[in-house]
Structures are given as structure tokens and as C-alpha cells.
Image (cartoon, rainbow, N blue to C red):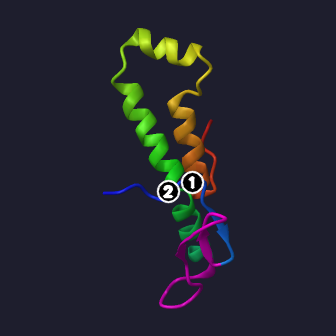
Amino acid sequence: MSGHTPGPWTIQGTFIGTDDAHIAQVKGEGRGVTSQRAEANSALIAAAPDLLAALLTLRDFAVMSNARQIAYLDAGNQHPVEVAQAAIAKATGVNHED
């Protein structure tokens, strides 16, 4: 599979995409889709690059030795769980950091 359009993706009206490309369009109400659900679908699609990046970071971090994990964090990198929490919050609109 070739690479996807790089993020960040944003919601621009009914379109999700970048300044240079439309990735998807989420239609509004109809066929059981409320405007609230359409907004939630847009947020989930727009968060896709962040969610993928968080999963890749978590995967890479999980296979590191303890020493490499400590070095990674000591280098000023954000903890992968925090990256995942931010991506989930973007996708859902709910912050669960507590």
C-alpha cells in the first residue's frame, strides 16, 4: 500500500483534508445519521493520521529495551501513551487523561 496523504487533516465544512487535498466528505443528516453523528464521524476521519502515528509510536516503544525507553523519554520525547491520549481526544472530542 502506498502512503496516505500526510496529516494533519482538518475539518473544512463537510470536507476533511489538508490545505492541498480533500480526503473525504461527510454528508449531513439522513438515513439515520444525525448532525451530531456526522460531526463525530468527521472528527474520527480527521484524526486518522494522528491515531496511526500514535499506534506506530506505541508499537515502537513497546519493543524497546528499558534502557532505550528511558533514553527516548530523556531526549524530550512525549510518552507514547500521552501521544495516544491526544489522538483519541482529537478523534472523540473527549479528554481522558485523568
> Label 1 is placed on what type of residue?
Gly
Residue 82: which quarter of the image?
A: top right
Residue 28: which quarter of the image?
A: bottom right
Q: Position of residue 56 (x, y in %)?
A: 41, 39
Q: CA distance from mark 2 to mark 1?
A: 8 Å
Asked if the magenta segment contains residue 38, the reply would be no
Secondary structure type for disc 1? loop
Task: Identify the residue shown where x is 51% and y is 12%.
Answer: 71
Q: Are the residues tagged 2 and 1 within 8 Å (C-beta)? A: yes
The residue positioned farthest toward the top in the image shown: 67
The residue tagged 2 is 48
Left or right of 89 on screen, residue 56: left
Q: Position of residue 61 (x, y in %)?
A: 41, 26
Task: Identify the residue shown where x is 60% and y is 60%.
Answer: 9
> Label 2 is placed on what type of residue?
Ala
Rendered position, 60 above or below 7: above
